[in-house]
Amino acid sequence: MSQAPLPPVTPADHVDVDNVQGDIILGLPKKKQEFVFFVITDAAKLKAALPSLQVTSTGDVIRSREAITKAKQQNPGTLVPLPLLNIAFSQHGLDALGIKDRLGDAVFSAGQLADAHNLGDQGKTTGGKFDPDWEQAFKIRIDAVLLVVGETWATVNAKVAETLNTLGDSVRVVYDLKASVRPGDNKGHEHFGWEDGISNPAVKGIGTPLPGQRVLPPGIIVTGKTGDTVRRPDWAVEGSFMAFRQLDQLVPEFHDFLEKNPIDHPGLDRKQGSELLGARLMGRWKSGAPIQLSPLRDDPELAKDPQRNNNFVYPQDKGEEGQTACPYAAHIRKTNPRNDLDNLAPKGVERASIIRAGIPFGPEVSFGENEEKVTEYHRGLAFVSYQSDLSEGFQFVQKSWANAPSFPPQKAAAGAPALVPGLDPIIGQANGASRTTLGTTSGHQLTLPRDFVVSRGGEYFFSPSIRALKTVFAGKAA
Ligand code: N7H
């Protein structure tokens, strides 16, 4: 059993980095990641085992990143062995542990299965009951998830084995997802080919914000801190709600669609027209360069420059003028409208901020899939986001922004109120119904043939503080 002293309780506007789990604010440094989902079979045994787990804090992440940077400076290309662990519990898990306090988040308590229709996932309604097309495990019951990361599979496998050994027969693994940064030049790029992880908000007091990076009051992400408006049980301070989604990406189909619908623009050939369409749907070029700053051609130098690649806002002209460079419907504009709501709800975008910590899963596209333009093997994004309130964070962004055709508001073209921005072309969904999106060329409505991102389900979790794990979760007084 660990003898480390418990961290002290910190004031509301300050985050104790040694008490907050490591994936929440800065992200665990990950090359390989395994998500191990389990149910609790013996609560007393699990409580006894929990204090022995070496759970990684945000402070550990800061120190690990420093170690990685130092090792790379001394020996470029070196991989530092870093097995890191986080753990989070669903409402079922809290119930199984006999934790009776309610956390004050109705979306978390109801669980993601109850939210599937509301989120727009595909499925069937029979006898008034919606049955989503999800992985079976997410439809039964999941109590908790282990997030294990490392620089190689050998490291991750050893850490998973060690952790499950510690938990012994107190748990039963019901589902498992292995995910990995893509190989070679695709490192850092998700399966559609885009550089990901460029834009995440910063939490006040932690790290130095980059130009254009939104700095959040800590309570937007971390529970019980300034900015969190809900009264939580005392022990629930310095935790965060985690939305997990297993999102399939239909990569060959998406690329086929781009190839068949190039934007016709003077000076651009067909291939460049297809690249422009992809950039307009996403809001960034594959390199990561924002289309708002580089509207017609990729700019790899801009993409690589952290001082510039996130430092932009959107023009506030109404109608077509405001989306000449970046469409209102572009994925990054739908999910982070930056200054688009400043006149309507000045704090609205801040409140809906999430910290993303996802990673690709599944194999590279095979030769055959590329040839036939049809997906054969499941691949996609193991999406993870953290927020202090699911109904204002993940659920709100998915439902009220990405899935809402008229968001951002007041952007319809003058004299053509029907030409609203449209669904988010990447993640917007309407329970499988066909959809349209606007904004490729003036007044032109582009019809997407299908969803290219398809949900296979997930769950909502609470990622407690290190202190809470050693006390309330271990069956001891807080
Ligand atoms: Fe998105 N993609 O790789 O195609 N996302 N996303 N996302 N996303 C972003 O700016 C992607 C999903 C956000 O601040 C980029 O870091 C894919 C969900 C937010 O300007 C790329 C999937 C939700 C941002 C992708 C997926 C979000 C963002 C640009 C699913 C929330 C920041 C890289 C398979 C409900 C926007 C970057 C900003 C950026 C991709 C899912 C939200 C390339 C493939 C479900 C807030």
Image (cartoon, rainbow, N blue to C red):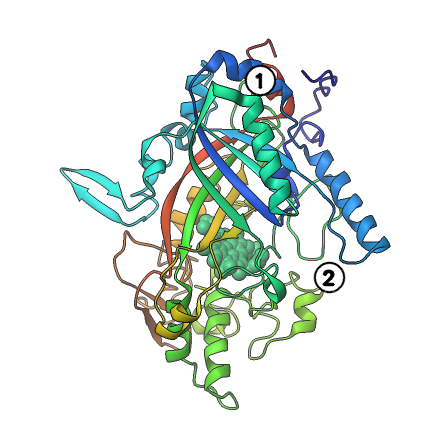
Q: Position of residue 453 (x, y in %)?
A: 39, 57
Evaluate whether residue 344 shows in this view.
Answer: no
Q: Earlier in the sequence, mark 1 or mark 2?
A: 1
Residue in view at x 54 percent, y 18 percent? 233
Q: Nearer the viewer, residue 64 or 313?
A: 64
| Image-quadrant location for residue 73 | bottom right
Q: Is residue 304 above or below residue 342?
A: below
- Residue at the far top in the pictured view: 477
Q: Is residue 404 above or below residue 279?
A: above
Q: Is residue 308 above or below residue 149?
A: below
Q: Secondary structure at mark 1?
A: helix
User: In the rendered view, does 54 fall on the left or right side of 295?
Assistant: right
Q: Which mark is residue 307?
A: 2
Under mark 2, the amino acid is Gln
Q: Nearer the viewer, residue 452 or 154?
A: 154
* Crowd around label 2: few <14 · some 14–19 · many ≥20 (10 Å): some
Q: Nearer the viewer, residue 149 or 319?
A: 149
Q: From the viewer's perspective, is the residue at label 1 or at label 2 nearer?
A: 1
User: In the rendered view, does 211 fall on the left or right side of 138?
Assistant: right
Residue wearing tag 1: 49
* Mark 1 Cβ and ligand 1 under 8 Å apart: no
